Amino acid sequence: MGLIQRAIEEAGIPTLSISLNRTITEKVKPPRAVLVGYPLGHPMGRPFDKNTQTALLKESLTLLGDIRVPGTLVDVSDRYRF
Amino acid sequence: MSLKTEKDKLIATFFEKHPALVDKWAKSAPIIINTTVPWSPVAGNPAEGPVALVTTAGVHLKSQTPFDMVDSEGDSSFRVIPSSSSAKDLTITHNYYNHGDADADVNVVFPIERLNELCGEGTVGHVAPRHFSFMGHIEGGHLAKLLEQTAPTVAAELKKDGVRAVFLTPA
């Protein structure tokens, strides 16, 4: 996914992705990513947990505007756990 | 169910239950290691949009051709998902992760309803007309095709739609 993200960013559109694994993200180096503490298959958390999904999406969009350093990975895994 | 499908789904369930093994795999896996980072500065508030979603979770409209689960190198094609689609129009074809929870609530991997709600309440200004979906298990020749063709094509389509922020979700 990080490779697709990089292609979109290279085309001139700011991007931010959810990361489920720090090692993969540090290798691929997307411009902006948010590391959550969720298992594979659950980038936005548990099914029907609308409040958490909304909070994570809102926080991600805020970070998309706030991050100023290319390659920043923000670790929110202590707050977004399964 | 074919033997390959059974094996792929078994591995997917195993990795979901053992995140430490995902990390062990990631450390030695043939993942592309980049040394530079592309960067497009944000102008204004990105939530004003248009905001588009891109996922590699294998989401697609039920009416669309499913992703290829037979080719062991995956499928580098993409599906266009109109942002007006409802969750019940969507399904997932992807044997390389356990999408039981995402089948029950697609927002687990593709937060289309959450984004529309944020737009409805005014937190997000505009949702893009189209979202885009891939199937994230891509290797070998398909990886080259992704990098040279399909990913740049999606980027160009997002530009055509005037998209100003993209939120991406893996599987």
Image: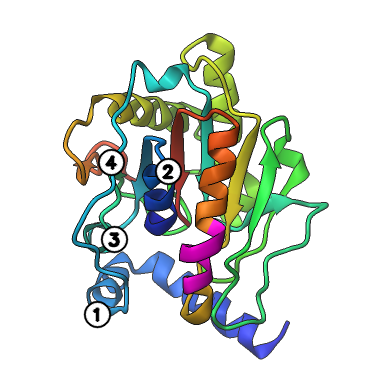
Q: Residue at x 37, y 55 (%)?
A: A2
Chain ID of residue with mark 3:
A
State the SS at label 1. helix
Q: Amino acid at mark 2?
A: Ala
Mark number displayed over residue A28? 3
Q: Which residues are magenta?
A: B144-150
Q: CA distance from mark 2 to mark 1?
A: 30 Å
Give me the C-alpha separation between circle 4 and circle 2: 9 Å
Discs 1, 3 touching: Cβ within 8 Å: no
Task: Work out whether disc 3 and disc 2 sit on a shared chain.
Answer: yes
Kindly indicate whether the residues beneath marks 2 and 1 are on one polypeptide chain: no
Amino acid type for the residue under numbered disc 3:
Val
Name the element at disc 2: loop
Q: Residues within 10 Å of mark 3 (few under 14, many from 20)?
A: many
Q: Which residue is disc 1 drawn over?
A: B28
The mark that comes first in sequence, 3 or 2, is 2
